[in-house]
């Protein structure tokens, strides 16, 4: 079967059938690339210095036009004056940006540097552009990270473009607007290589009898033929490729909205107790591919490159690593694309994977890292409704509407990811080793527990119940390649977990400059060490706090005594790590905390002792219920002594899966109170104390009802917030650059 360039064929079909009629810049981009390629082919014997207004400009030029062997250096406009031009006289200097190219030319002339301007060259050959050649949409974009509008194509979010095209299509009452938006939606689907969604909207276009129905019908047939060719071509590829579908922040159990992905559990080796070492993406990557832990091995100092142990070993075995990821810590030499910083859709990455497999003569280890659809705020082509949650700020607390919208987007986006996963898994032949995994969760009690499944030819499906830590990922890969079915030697009774203090400057600065925000996010500042078993989770934070609760599926009462064996497994957190330059701004947070403790530590101890005194005043035979099963009850539990915890019979909460359930406490509804023979109810809430007290006085009959904060007030302790929250003041704050 003769090899075909599927991307070139696709682009020709789009132009041939007028699919880009509402995006005329698409054809101009293809013309520009052709002209630039002609120039590059005439200059291959030279080393090029690319002069650019932004890294986006240089990235696209490198990716699409200049081979890596030719593009020697990248010089941004602000670096022109510092660059050693005297050493580069023999190099080809190329201005690759549209904007600011004249100013750049003048500055290069000042240094007597001959240069070549790409956009002047295009104009000379009859192609006059009004912006960067690669920007076919020509509009403002919304930055994924801070929600600010920008003209940088690196911030292109096709999910948002499709959302608004679909929304405008829905509200348009008649042609020609309705036809135009439907045509734009079809182009959007083709642009991101979602063939199933494309078919759905082409069918709608034809059913409605719009102007270009015949062209769309023929185009769809050509796409079917192209896909059939690709699948057949891949079936003839006998390379034992490995494809790793990395679904970021997909928590264990969240595949309930992903029927295809969930069905794979029955066809796979399914690790029910897989755990990341740390619930953060970059650190997890270093555990997976370099067998290192973030604290013990100081992984914040290393990159993901060919020196990483697993990558090195697999390349020794004849594999070429290919990452499709936004992670800047992954070296460009092993990235499948150089422009993954933008909001690349999952289907685009899958198509790039397929394209690489068609071209490659080597065995491939492909990592497809999907973030935007499986990680808050959960954006995808699957979003419906009238609103679109752009919010990505790490330092902002969501309001109730944003939380609701975020939950809706999660359900819709996970279903969409599932559809894309099913669509592209169908491209892969049986001889491909498939790994399906997540790197961490997002809720406090489940953020270490991940989804992990593997499928390969001739394997026998089975469920693995032992604790599988990601530190053993390399061993699992070797077992998979050797077709071993015994995984007992890479599972254990527990797994280590750990992470460093938060160190990102801008976020820490925002937290320390906003007392209300600091009050809500204080816990995120601290590193920790801990351990997880089948039954329990234990975490010891650097500020001295401990957390312990039941693991999923367990319901026994958690006590300090029961958790002691996990506590003993935790090696001390290295005291010198904070001196590393990486934690320059983390030290500000630590000093702030120290100031708070000097000022308020004694009062905090008095409050916690008063809470314990309350339980001591009650009879040892007292049957106590706590009203409220959220974070407040978790913190109350940690404050109590073990003998006091034993007196707590149950928690009263409408949510049977509330946080307190993870302590092993029975959860009952308010209408079940009389069935439990409760003596005393303590209201475990600051915000709802008055409301719940009035409700219980009416419904609890003779049961004694105590408001925790009412009791503290009687003891002469006035709390302006939850008893466990730290009351920072401006004088506590330390900030040093």
Image: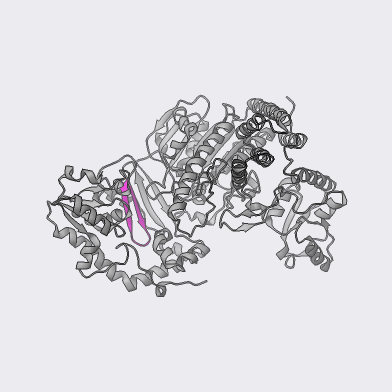
**Left or right, 559 with reference to 258:** left
Q: Which corner quadrant of the image does residue 336 belong to? A: top right
The quadrant holding residue 200 is top right
> On screen, 48 above or below 28?
below
Q: 507 or 142, which is in the foreground?
A: 142
Residue farthest toward the bottom in the current orientation of the protein: 731
From the top left corner, tell me how far across and down residue 404 is, in percent.
44, 49
Tell whether 735 sits left or right of 699: right
Find out whether residue 541 is within the magenta segment.
Answer: yes
Residue 351 drawn above or below residue 601? above
Regarding residue 86, the answer to whether it shows in the image is: no
Count the marks.
Answer: 0
Q: Is residue 554 left or right of residue 673?
A: right
Q: x, y percentage for residue 60? A: 71, 50
Q: Give the range drawn in magenta.
A: 537-550
Residue 644 shows in this picture = yes
Q: Position of residue 168 (x, y in %)?
A: 61, 44
Query: In which quadrant of the rendered image does the N terminus lie?
Result: top right
């Amino acid at each position: 079967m003769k090899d075909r360039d599927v991307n070139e064929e696709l682009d020709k079909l789009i132009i041939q059938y007028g699919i880009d009629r509402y995006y005329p810049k698409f054809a101009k981009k293809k013309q520009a690339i052709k002209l630039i390629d002609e120039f590059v082919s005439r200059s291959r014997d030279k080393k090029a210095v690319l002069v650019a207004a932004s890294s986006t400009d240089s990235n696209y030029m490198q990716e699409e036009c200049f081979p890596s062997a030719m593009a020697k250096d990248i010089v941004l406009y602000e670096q022109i004056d510092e660059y050693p031009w005297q050493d580069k006289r023999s190099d080809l200097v190329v201005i690759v940006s549209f904007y600011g190219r004249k100013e750049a030319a003048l500055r290069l002339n000042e240094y007597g540097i001959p240069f070549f301007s790409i956009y002047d060259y295009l104009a000379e050959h009859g192609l006059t552009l009004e912006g960067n050649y690669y920007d076919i949409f020509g509009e403002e974009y919304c930055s994924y990270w801070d929600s600010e509008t920008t003209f940088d194509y690196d911030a292109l979010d096709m999910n948002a473009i499709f959302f608004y095209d679909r929304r405008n299509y829905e509200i348009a009452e008649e042609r020609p607007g309705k036809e135009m938006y439907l045509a734009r939606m079809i182009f959007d689907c083709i642009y991101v290589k979602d063939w199933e969604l494309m078919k759905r909207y082409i069918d709608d276009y034809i059913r409605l009898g719009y102007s270009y129905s015949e062209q769309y019908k023929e185009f769809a047939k050509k796409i079917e033929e192209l896909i059939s060719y690709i699948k057949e071509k891949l079936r003839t590829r006998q390379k034992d490729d490995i494809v790793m579908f990395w679904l970021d922040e997909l928590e264990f159990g969240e595949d309930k909205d992903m029927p295809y992905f969930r069905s794979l559990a029955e066809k796979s080796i399914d690790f029910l107790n897989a755990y990341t070492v740390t619930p953060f993406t970059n650190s997890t990557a270093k555990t997976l591919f370099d067998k290192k832990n973030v604290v013990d091995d100081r992984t914040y100092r290393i990159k993901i490159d060919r020196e990483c142990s697993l990558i090195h070993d697999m390349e020794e075995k004849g594999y070429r690593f290919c990452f499709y990821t936004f992670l800047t810590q992954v070296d460009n030499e092993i990235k499948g694309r150089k422009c993954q910083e933008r909001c690349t859709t999952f289907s685009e990455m899958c198509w790039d994977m397929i394209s690489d497999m068609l071209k490659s003569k080597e065995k491939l280890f492909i990592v497809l890292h999907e973030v935007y659809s499986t990680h808050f705020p959960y954006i995808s082509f699957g979003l419906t409704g009238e609103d679109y949650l752009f919010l990505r700020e790490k330092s902002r607390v969501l309001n109730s509407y944003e939380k609701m919208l975020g939950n809706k987007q999660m359900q819709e986006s996970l279903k969409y990811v599932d559809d894309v996963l099913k669509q592209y898994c169908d491209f892969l032949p049986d001889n491909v080793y498939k790994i399906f995994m997540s790197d961490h969760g997002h809720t406090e009690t489940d953020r270490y527990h991940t989804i992990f499944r593997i499928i390969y030819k001739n394997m026998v499906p089975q469920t693995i119940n032992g604790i599988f830590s990601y530190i053993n990922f390399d061993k699992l890969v070797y077992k998979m390649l050797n077709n071993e079915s015994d995984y007992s030697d890479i599972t254990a009774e527990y797994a280590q977990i750990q992470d460093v203090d938060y160190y990102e400057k801008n976020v820490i600065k925002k937290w320390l400059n906003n007392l209300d925000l600091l009050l809500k996010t204080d816990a995120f500042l601290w590193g920790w060490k801990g351990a997880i078993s089948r039954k329990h989770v234990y975490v010891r934070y650097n500020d001295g706090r401990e957390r312990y609760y039941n693991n999923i599926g367990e319901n026994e009462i958690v006590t300090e005594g029961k958790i002691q064996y996990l506590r003993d497994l935790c090696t001390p957190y290295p005291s010198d790590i904070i001196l590393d330059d990486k934690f320059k701004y983390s030290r500000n947070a630590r000093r702030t905390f120290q100031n708070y403790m000097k000022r308020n530590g004694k009062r905090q101890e008095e409050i916690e002792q008063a809470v314990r005194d309350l339980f001591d005043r009650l009879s040892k035979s007292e049957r106590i219920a706590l009203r409220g099963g959220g974070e407040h009850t978790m913190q109350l539990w940690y404050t109590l002594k073990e003998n006091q915890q034993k007196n707590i019979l149950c928690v009263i909460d409408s949510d049977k899966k509330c946080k307190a359930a993870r302590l092993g406490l029975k959860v009952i509804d308010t209408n079940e109170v009389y069935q439990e023979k409760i003596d005393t109810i303590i209201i475990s809430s600051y915000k709802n104390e008055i409301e719940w007290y009035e409700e219980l006085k009416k419904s609890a009959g003779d049961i004694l009802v105590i408001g925790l904060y009412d009791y503290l007030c009687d003891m002469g302790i006035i709390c302006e917030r939850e008893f466990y929250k730290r009351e920072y003041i401006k004088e506590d704050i330390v900030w040093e650059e």
